[in-house]
Image: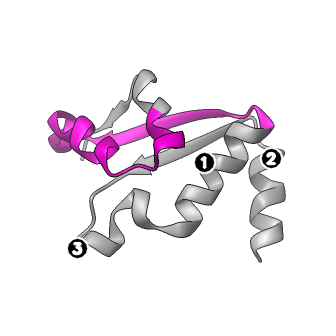
């Protein structure tokens, strides 16, 4: 449930956000309502967020963040970890 997800995020020590574009606009990470909610819950609770991105998308971080809501663009100040296949 949404409330269980929120409790899980708020009680976590770290939230790992795997940032992807997805196969279409609606599946972009920052356009998925629960992905955005999880990030906001983490920020509100002071939980550290670690963005992760596929190594082949490293050059697209700015493009991905341009889709993020204004209050989440601060994720750009965090070093993204690259995920190798």
The secondary structure type at the circle numbered 1 is helix
Horizontal and vertical percent for residue 41?
72, 49
Check the image and report above or below for 19 versus 55.
below
Determine whether, in the image, residue 8 is placed left or right of residue 74: right
- Around disc 2, counting alpha carbons within 10 Å, would you say few (fewer than 14), some (14 to 19), or many (20 or more)? many
Give the colour scheme shown: one colour
- Around disc 3, counting alpha carbons within 10 Å, would you say few (fewer than 14), some (14 to 19), or many (20 or more)? few
The secondary structure type at the circle numbered 3 is loop
Question: Which residue does the numbered mark 3 point to in the structure image?
Answer: 24
Question: Which residue does the numbered mark 2 point to in the structure image?
Answer: 10
In depth, the one of 60 and 18 nearer the eye is 60
In three-dimensional space, the C-alpha distance between marks 1 and 2, rounded to whole angstroms, equals 10 Å
- Around disc 1, counting alpha carbons within 10 Å, would you say few (fewer than 14), some (14 to 19), or many (20 or more)? many
The secondary structure type at the circle numbered 2 is helix
Horizontal and vertical percent for residue 14?
67, 36
Quadrant of the image for the N terminus?
A: bottom right
Check the image and report above or below for 18 versus 71.
below
Q: To which quarter of the image does residue 76 belong?
A: top left
Question: How many numbered marks does the figure carry?
Answer: 3
Q: Is residue 50 magenta?
A: yes
In depth, the one of 84 and 14 nearer the eye is 14
Determine whether, in the image, residue 8 is placed left or right of residue 32: right
Residue at 34% from the left image edge and 71% from the top image edge: 27
Residue at 78% from the left image edge and 59% from the top image edge: 6
Horizontal and vertical percent for residue 4?
82, 67
Q: Bounds of the magenta span?
A: 45-73
The numbered mark, 1 or 3, whose residue comes first in the sequence reads 3
Question: Which residue does the numbered mark 1 point to in the structure image?
Answer: 39
Q: Is residue 46 magenta?
A: yes
Tell whether label 2 touches label 3 (CB within 8 Å): no
């Amino acid at each position: 449930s949404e409330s269980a997800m929120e409790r899980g995020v708020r009680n976590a020590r770290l939230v790992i956000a795997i940032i992807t574009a997805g196969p279409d606009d609606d599946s972009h990470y920052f356009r998925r309502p629960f992905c955005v909610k999880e990030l906001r819950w983490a920020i509100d609770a002071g939980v550290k967020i670690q963005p992760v991105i596929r190594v082949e998308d490293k050059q697209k971080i700015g493009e991905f963040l341009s889709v993020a809501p204004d209050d989440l663009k601060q994720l750009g100040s965090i070093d993204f970890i690259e995920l190798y296949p």
